[in-house]
Amino acid sequence: MLQGIDVSNWQGSVDWSAHARAGVAFAFAKATEGGDYVDRFFARNWEGMRANWIVCGAYHFARPKGDPVEGARNFLRTITLAGGLRRGDLVAIDLETTDGLRPEQVARHARRWCHYVERHGGLRPLVYTYQSFARSGACAGLGEYPLWIASPDQPGGDPMVPGPWTEWTIHQYSNRPVDRNVFDGTRQALTRLGFHKR
């Protein structure tokens, strides 16, 4: 299985060469949140992953009370300003807060965000979420997108899969000392899920 990590501004400055030497093959860095927030370390992280031959991933922290199209535009614009998407790069929506909305409203927000990114970014996002959030109905209609499941209480590579999914793609199995993930496949299989120029 390929080993990966995910980071945000909470990790501060990340030593990507050290992670690459330690066997990290892929990574996700937080890019945006809602319609206007940009993670101040994203551009540095994007460049650091790229420079160390780590499969690059970017994620957007969804704020369901906001406009999903604004959020998607903010996300794609932020990636462009950091150097843009290249072949095999991955994107994801981080779905873990309702902002006080009903599950069906959260799911509708996420679907609209994903559709916009697919249409204008040219790739299919992964959906990052956790068991109880998915089971609440907040991920309804997202089963067509690859699942990145947070399940730190399960052994790496053996998570429980909540509906609407029937299989997992990436498993976040640990949060210490950094969020750790696995992908059950080759680097080539992983990058096939990513960006490819039309």
Image (cartoon, rainbow, N blue to C red):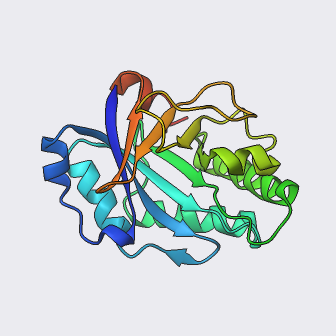
Residue drawn at (63%, 58%) of the image: 96
Vertical placement of 3 versus 37: above or below?
A: above
Tell me if I can see residue 196 in this picture: no
Q: Is residue 102 left or right of residue 54?
A: right
Q: Quadrant of residue 42?
A: bottom left
Q: Please name whichever residue, 192 or 108, is drawn nearer the observer in this view of the structure.
A: 108
Q: Please name whichever residue, 150 or 86, is drawn nearer the observer in this view of the structure.
A: 150
Residue drawn at (73%, 54%) of the image: 110
Q: Is residue 183 left or right of residue 61?
A: left
Q: Is residue 75 left or right of residue 139?
A: left
Q: Which image quarter is the N terminus in?
A: top left
Counting from the top left corner in percent of width and height, residue 134 is at 71, 45
Vertical placement of 39 versus 83: above or below?
A: below
Q: Quadrant of residue 15?
A: bottom left
Counting from the top left corner in percent of width and height, residue 116 is at 71, 52
- Total numbered labels: 0
Counting from the top left corner in percent of width and height, residue 9 is at 37, 71
Vertical placement of 177 versus 158: above or below?
A: below
Tell me if I can see residue 2 in this picture: yes
Counting from the top left corner in percent of width and height, residue 198 is at 55, 34
Residue drawn at (59%, 68%) of the image: 74
Vertical placement of 4 versus 2: above or below?
A: below
Residue drawn at (55%, 49%) of the image: 92
Q: Is residue 182 left or right of residue 161?
A: left
